């Protein structure tokens, strides 16, 4: 009888082990623990056991009952907390998740900052919403200058005195840097600028510029040109060249237009071409005076380049609007 009980316990536990759902659990309960179940049947059979055997068999029967009931309770807990529905095969490959990537302009900006950083320029910053002092006056752009008119600027809240505008150039950061730091200084600034231009393939009302400013004793045009040559070679490769053409900007004297010979992609083929990228020059003494720097002691150079131009030429992008439409199919080409 005792051996029968051992076998019964094993049988019940083995059966329970393969139960995996509510229906199987209920069937097990009825067959083993129910009022007509196997355990009850054995208990009834206890009557036929001899007096001497009874205590041992009774004790063992209680143990087996407790063992099966305990295992059943554990299994019920596990089964009812199991997720419903079809089992998930965690080894399946799954669906590909669209991966993000840096925008082609952001890539260009990061590369420019990286090159300038290695050349010793630290990054300075200024607000996109500016006052006329930083956007014009301190940059030696007189009140009467045509570029200060409403047609060329996004002024805020109409034409009142002390007005604010969206900055039209990152040269504003030159002024902010000189107001907050003492020379010698070597900074670059990258950011958005705004002009009320109608949108077409080469114009947009918002674009990005990178500005450079270096002030020290005895800085000369040679330093400017050397810096720009180094920048061009680091950015476009050792074959890159630059060209300065005499020009005019109110905040530099002398001033020059900056062309870079860049490797551009044309019909899928690389080709070297002169591209006008921005302006540069020696900081005008009037700008130094506006920020309280002595022009007899300090000299400096500055430059400002359009980043979209660099990116468009470098990557063979024919229309500036593509850069801001954020069509993922276009942007993915540069990821
Ligand atoms: N701010 C000028 C522009 O937006 C570009 C420029 C010219 C920046 C000469 C400079 C500079 O720093 O020296 O057209």
Image (cartoon, helix red, strand yellow):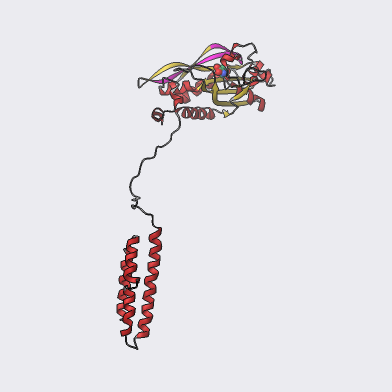
Residue 280 visible in the snapshot:
no
Q: Is residue 186 above or below residue 79?
A: above
Asked where in the image residue 98 lies, by quadrant, the reply is top left
In which quadrant is the C terminus drawn?
top left
Q: Is residue 235 left or right of residue 142?
A: left
Please state the quadrant of the image where ligand 1 appears.
top right
Asked where in the image residue 284 lies, by quadrant, the reply is top right
Residue 324 visible in the snapshot:
yes
Q: Nearer the viewer, residue 174 or 131?
A: 131
Q: Is residue 36 left or right of residue 101?
A: left
Number of callouts in the render?
0
What's the magenta bit mostly, secondary-structure-wise?
strand
In the rendered structure, which segment of residues is drawn in magenta? 246-265
Q: Is residue 256 left or right of residue 329?
A: right
Which residue is at the far bottom?
A: 52
Residue at x 60%, y 11% (from the top left corner):
146
Asked where in the image residue 154 lies, by quadrant, the reply is top right
Q: Is residue 247 magenta?
A: yes
Q: Position of residue 67 (x, y in %)?
A: 38, 72
Q: Position of residue 194 (x, y in %)?
A: 55, 21
Residue at x 43%, y 34% (from the top left corner):
101
Which residue is at the far front?
A: 35
Q: Position of residue 170 (x, y in %)?
A: 57, 22
Q: Is residue 88 left or right of residue 255?
A: left
Q: Nearer the viewer, residue 121 or 204?
A: 204
Q: Is residue 244 above or below residue 120?
A: above
In which quadrant is the N terminus drawn?
bottom left
Residue at x 36%, y 83% (from the top left corner):
56
Q: Is residue 289 magenta?
A: no
Q: Position of residue 265 (x, y in %)?
A: 39, 21
């Amino acid at each position: 009888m005792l051996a029968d009980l051992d076998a019964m316990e094993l049988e019940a536990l083995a059966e329970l082990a393969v139960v995996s759902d509510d229906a199987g659990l209920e069937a097990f309960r009825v067959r083993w623990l129910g009022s007509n179940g196997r355990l009850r049947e054995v208990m009834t059979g206890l009557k036929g056991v001899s007096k001497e055997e009874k205590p041992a068999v009774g004790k063992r029967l209680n143990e087996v009952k407790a063992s099966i009931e305990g295992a059943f309770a554990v299994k019920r807990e596990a089964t009812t907390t199991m997720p419903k529905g079809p089992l998930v095969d965690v080894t399946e490959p799954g669906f590909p998740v669209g991966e993000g990537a840096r925008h082609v302009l952001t890539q260009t900006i990061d590369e420019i900052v990286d090159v300038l950083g290695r050349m010793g320029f630290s990054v300075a910053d200024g607000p996109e919403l500016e006052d006329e002092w930083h956007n014009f006056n301190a940059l030696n752009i007189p009140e009467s200058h045509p570029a200060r008119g409403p047609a060329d600027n996004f002024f805020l809240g109409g034409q009142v005195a002390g007005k604010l505008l969206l900055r039209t150039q990152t040269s504003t950061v030159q002024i902010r840097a000189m107001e907050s730091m003492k020379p010698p200084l070597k900074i670059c600034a990258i950011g958005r600028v705004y002009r009320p231009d109608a949108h077409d393939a080469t114009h947009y009302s918002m674009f990005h510029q990178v500005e450079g400013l270096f002030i020290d004793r005895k800085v000369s045009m040679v330093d400017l040109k050397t810096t720009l040559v180094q920048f061009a070679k680091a950015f476009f490769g050792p074959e890159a060249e630059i060209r300065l053409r005499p020009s005019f900007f109110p905040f530099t004297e002398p001033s020059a237009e900056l062309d870079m010979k860049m490797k551009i992609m044309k019909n899928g083929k690389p080709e070297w071409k002169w591209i006008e990228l921005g302006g540069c020059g020696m900081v005008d003494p009037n700008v130094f005076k506006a920020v309280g720097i002595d022009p007899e002691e300090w000299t400096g150079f500055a430059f400002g380049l359009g980043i979209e131009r660099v990116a468009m030429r470098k990557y063979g992008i024919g229309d500036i609007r593509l850069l801001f439409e954020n069509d993922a199919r276009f942007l993915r080409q540069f990821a």
